[in-house]
């Protein structure tokens, strides 16, 4: 059975993993997608649906961590306009 602490920990882990992306647009997308997913499922009461949603969140966390490793291994050659400093 999944308790509230595990769900909050998963949400924090997803948000933390999303902050590791070097690209601003992907960081913001990961943050928005994580919060939207948790807000969409916040009213679940059926234990099997909660466990299914939690399992899906864990799979998404694994994907995010794997993709972050790839992004860090092969960083983009150009910077995003949001990351350029005004000179």
Image (cartoon, rainbow, N blue to C red):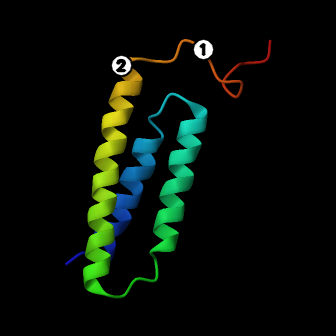
Task: Using the image as rendered, state which of residue 52 and residue 10 is in the foreground.
Answer: 52
Element at badge 2? helix
The circle on residue 78 is 1
Placement of 31 over or under 65, stated as above or below: below
The circle on residue 2 is none
User: Is 47 on the left-hand or right-hand side of 68?
Assistant: left
Sequence-earlier tag: 2 or 1: 2
Q: Where is residue 61 in the image (x, y as percent from the top left)?
A: 33, 50
Element at badge 1? loop
Q: Which residue lies furthest to the left in this view?
A: 1
Residue in view at x 28 percent, y 54 percent: 59
Residue in view at x 36 percent, y 34 percent: 67
Residue in view at x 52 percent, y 71 percent: 39
Q: Can residue 3 be seen in this view?
A: no
Which residue has dot 2 on it?
A: 73
Q: Could you tell me which quadrant the C terminus lies in? A: top right
Placement of 44 over or under 55, stated as above or below: below
Instruction: Place residue 52 in its image quadrant.
Output: bottom left
Q: Which residue lies furthest to the right in this view?
A: 87
Instruction: Place residue 46 in its image quadrant.
Output: bottom left
User: Is 3 on the left-hand or right-hand side of 43?
Assistant: left
Q: Where is residue 58 in the image (x, y as percent from the top left)?
A: 28, 57
Residue in view at x 24 percent, y 75 percent: 2
Q: Where is residue 9 in the image (x, y as percent from the top left)?
A: 34, 61
Q: Could you tell me which quadrant the N terminus lies in? A: bottom left
Mark 1 and mark 2 in contact (Cβ < 8 Å)? no
Q: Residues within 10 Å of mark 1 (few under 14, many from 20)?
A: few
Q: Position of residue 27 (x, y in %)?
A: 54, 40
Distance CA(mark 2)–CA(mark 1): 15 Å
Q: How crowded is mark 2: few (under 14 residues within 10 Å), some or many (20 or more)?
A: few
């Amino acid at each position: 059975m999944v308790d509230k602490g595990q769900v909050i920990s998963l949400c924090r882990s997803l948000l933390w993993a999303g902050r590791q992306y070097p690209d601003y647009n992907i960081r913001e997308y990961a943050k928005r997608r994580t919060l939207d997913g948790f807000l969409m499922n916040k009213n679940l009461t059926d234990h099997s649906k909660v466990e299914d949603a939690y399992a899906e969140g864990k799979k998404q966390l694994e994907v995010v961590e794997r993709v972050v490793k790839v992004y860090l291994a092969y960083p983009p050659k150009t910077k995003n306009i949001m990351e350029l400093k005004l000179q």
